[in-house]
Image (cartoon, rainbow, N blue to C red):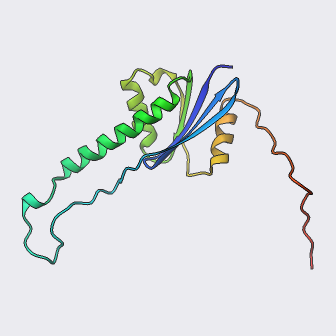
Amino acid sequence: MKQQVGVWIDHRKAYVVLLTPEGEHKALIISNVETQARRGGDAPLKGPYEARQVSPDDRLQRALTKHLNIYYDSVIAAMRDAEVFFLFGPGEAKLELKRRLAKVRLAARIAALEPADKMPDLQIVAKVRKFFGCEIPRMPMRGKKATLKSK
């Protein structure tokens, strides 16, 4: 079995699932990026607006892009050893990661790119295992089986 990786990604976090012959490895990468950048300057009711006090929008966009590139580079570092990539998640982050992978010449390893809603960690792992055709292990029973009693 070759190394395969599935990545659920949005602008706030990425959940990386690496499937290897030795087992399954998971990593959570937090971006620490504020997507709604706040502009500094005067409040609307505190006096006149001066252009020098407020950052231009393109400067804020460049700062956001710089932070996202650092985030995408850390995601790529976590998945670089895999031979096949499966990218999914809500929004534009998966497409931005695909473009970033193209810049480092790893885009040919992408097997699929799918939209997906937010989901819990176990669902992400199950989706990755299902995509790559791995058997999903059953969870062992802990203690006695719970039964519902009617009143």
Using the rendered view, name the quadrant where residue 148 is placed. bottom right
Using the rendered view, name the quadrant where residue 140 is placed. top right
Percent x, y of residue 19: 65, 29
Percent x, y of residue 111: 55, 26
Q: Residue at x 26, y 46 (%)?
A: 63
- Left or right: where 135 falls relative to 88: right
- Left or right: where 6 falls relative to 45: right
- Left or right: where 89 falls relative to 139: left
Above or below 103: residue 123: below
Q: Is residue 86 visible?
A: yes
The residue nearer to you, when weighing 73 against 56, is: 73
Q: Is residue 114 visible?
A: no
Using the rendered view, name the quadrant where residue 49 is placed. bottom left
Q: Residue at x 42, y 44 (%)?
A: 92
Q: Residue at x 91, y 57 (%)?
A: 145
The residue nearer to you, when weighing 38 against 91, is: 38
Quarter of the image with the C terminus is bottom right
Please state the total of marks drawn on the protein image: 0
The residue nearer to you, when weighing 24 against 109, is: 24
Percent x, y of residue 40: 20, 62
Above or below 85: residue 58: below
Quarter of the image with the N terminus is top right
